[in-house]
Amino acid sequence: MKKLFLFVFCLTTLNQVFSQTLIGCALQGTAAGQYTVYQSSDNSEIDRATNEELRFLAQSFLVTPTFFYYDDSRGMNAFSTPENLAGSQSQFGTICFGLNLIKEQISLSTNGTNVPIILAHEFAHTVARRYGLNLPTKQNELFADYLAGGYMFYRARNFKTTDVQAAFQSFYNMGDNDFTNPNHHGTPASRSACIRQGYNDCLNAMQQGKVFTLDEGVRMGVNFVTSHNFD
Ligand SMILES: [Zn+2]
């Protein structure tokens, strides 16, 4: 029985180690080094929910990066990189989500809503590259948070039941306060402000009968994060 399980596991996952310095943004700190990536989380429920989410993310953000789970046992994380990993080919690069992080975040949220907001943050980095924004690190992070907030508004409205407050709280808990770190993502308060602004801008627009295009969302996000002095 055990052998059969292992055999199936090998068939359904792509198990490949890659070693390179990633230019992409990580959810927390940097993502560099050697990782093992997988096409499956080895949990059919997680795979199904993630694949549905990836389709709605692609519709929302108009980019289709390759997605992998990866072994984040050395530090829970998720990241977006312009590089094509493990032989994948996408003009939008790759997004990787740590297996430990996804399982932790699912356990912390009643309906898994913490995972979509992280995925949306990573997709927003892919969008930022596509638009050639080249914002400084902190502003780039806060811009991704802004777009993630907007995504959560449209997700709740057009896709699935969304525990927005729980998702926002999970992000608040991930903000860092390491001011000397060049990879500083913004304090929890700053991240929270940008997520809420993205959400509220979409809500206010909807109340006036308007749905933002991606171009408009990007422009508003850039404007918001560059016109405020965030910690
Ligand atoms: Zn980021």
Image (tube, helix red, strand yellow):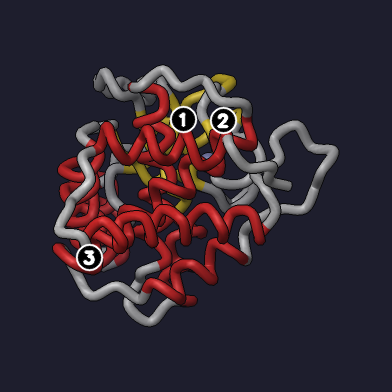
Q: Name the N-terminal-most of marks 1 and 2.
A: 1
Q: Amino acid at mark 3?
A: Gln
Point out the residue furthest to the front here. Answer: 208
Image quadrant for the N terminus? bottom left
Percent of width and height locating residue 197: 46, 56
Q: CA distance from mark 1 to mark 3?
A: 48 Å
Percent of width and height locating residue 231: 73, 47
Q: Name the N-terminal-most of marks 2 and 3.
A: 2
Q: Which mark is residue 136?
A: none
Q: Secondary structure at mark 3?
A: helix
Mark 3 — residue?
207
Mark 2 — residue?
34
Point out the residue furthest to the right here. Answer: 180
Indicate the quadrant where residue 155 lies: bottom left
Mark 1 — residue?
17
Marks 3 and 1: in contact by CB < 8 Å? no
Q: Is residue 42 visible?
A: no
Q: Residues within 10 Å of mark 3 (few under 14, many from 20)?
A: few
Q: Residues within 10 Å of mark 2 (few under 14, many from 20)?
A: few
Q: Amino acid at mark 2?
A: Gln
Q: Secondary structure at mark 1?
A: strand
Residue at (31, 20) in percent of width and height: 87
Point out the residue furthest to the bottom here. Answer: 110
The residue lying toward the viewer, choosing from 90 and 123, is 123
Residue at (30, 24) in percent of width and height: 92
Q: Name the N-terminal-most of marks 1 and 3.
A: 1
Percent of width and height locating residue 185: 65, 43
Marks 3 and 2: in contact by CB < 8 Å? no
Q: Amino acid at mark 1?
A: Val
Marks 2 and 1: in contact by CB < 8 Å? yes
